[in-house]
Each structure stands twice: as C-alpha cells, then as structure tokens.
Amino acid sequence: MAHIPTTFKIKKLGKIKKAQQGLQDIKQVILSRVGQIDMEKCMVNAGGKYDLILIAAQRARELAAGDVSIMGDSGKPIVTALLEIQAGLLDREEYKNRLVSRK
C-alpha cells in the first residue's frame, strides 16, 4: 500500500466535512419546504394519488429541464411541483393539455 502524506489526508477530511455540512444545509432547506406540503390536498387537487404521481413527475421533469415556476425556487423540482399542485396551479386537465400540446 502506498504511503499517503498526512497533509493530503487532512485536506481531504476537511473537504469531506465541508461537503457533509453542505448536504446537511440542503437537507434542512428541503425538509423545511417539504413540511409545507399537504399530501391530502395535493391528492384532491390532482384527482387522486395516481394522477398526483403522474402530474408531479411530469412537472418535476419540466422544472429540471429549465421551466420557471411562479412558486419560486424550492430547491428540488419535485418539491416545487408538489407545491404548485397543492396551490391548485396544476390539475388533471392542465396535465392533459400539456401532454397534448407537446405532441
């Protein structure tokens, strides 16, 4: 096994700790926004749990591709999509219209 200098190990540990802290910060932001999502309301607005999954997944893909949300940036596209559904901005009819307009 090759000898790794101590300074390299310390620098690498420092970078790992910074990355871990960054991940914790991101996780806290996401969890704070996820706490605002009422899944029951989302299911009612979407028309059911299966429609909710389809609508949220499609909208998250659109957001990840660069579409802009009027809800603001929530970090993860899926969180933003769920917040839009909860607010009543997206429903089954809107989802169908988006699919038809893409073809």
Image: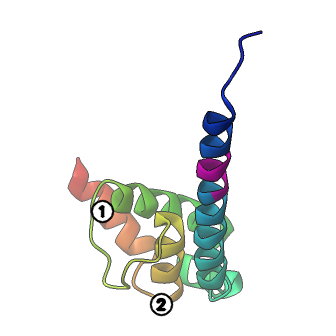
Residue drawn at x 58%, y 50% as measured from the top left = 15
Is label 2 in a helix, a strand or a loop?
loop
| Residue 94 screen position, x and y as percent | 36, 73
Q: Amino acid at mark 2?
A: Ala
How are the colours assigned in the image? rainbow
Residue drawn at x 65%, y 77% as measured from the top left = 28
Q: Farthest front residue?
A: 6
Circle 1 packing at 10 Å, graded few (<14), some (14-19), many (20+), is few
3D distance between C-alphas at marks 1 and 2: 18 Å
Circle 2 packing at 10 Å, graded few (<14), some (14-19), many (20+), is some
**Quarter of the figure with residue 84:** bottom left
Residue drawn at x 63%, y 38% as measured from the top left = 7
Q: Amino acid at mark 1?
A: Arg
| Residue 37 screen position, x and y as percent | 63, 84
94 relative to 52 in the view: left or right: left
| Residue 22 screen position, x and y as percent | 58, 64
Task: In the rendered view, tell whether residue 72 sits above or below residue 14.
Answer: below
Residue 15 belongs to magenta span = yes
Kindly report which numbered mark, 1 or 2, lies closer to the viewer in this rendering. 2
30 relative to 98 in the view: left or right: right
Is label 1 in a helix, a strand or a loop?
helix
Q: Looking at this view, is 3 or 57 the one in front?
A: 3
95 relative to 4 in the view: left or right: left
For disc 1, the marked residue is 98
Magenta stretch mostly in which secondary structure? helix
Q: Farthest top residue?
A: 1
Q: Which residues are magenta?
A: 13-17
For disc 2, the marked residue is 87
33 relative to 17 in the view: left or right: left
- Label annotation for residue 34: none
Q: Looking at this view, is 63 or 93 the one in front?
A: 63
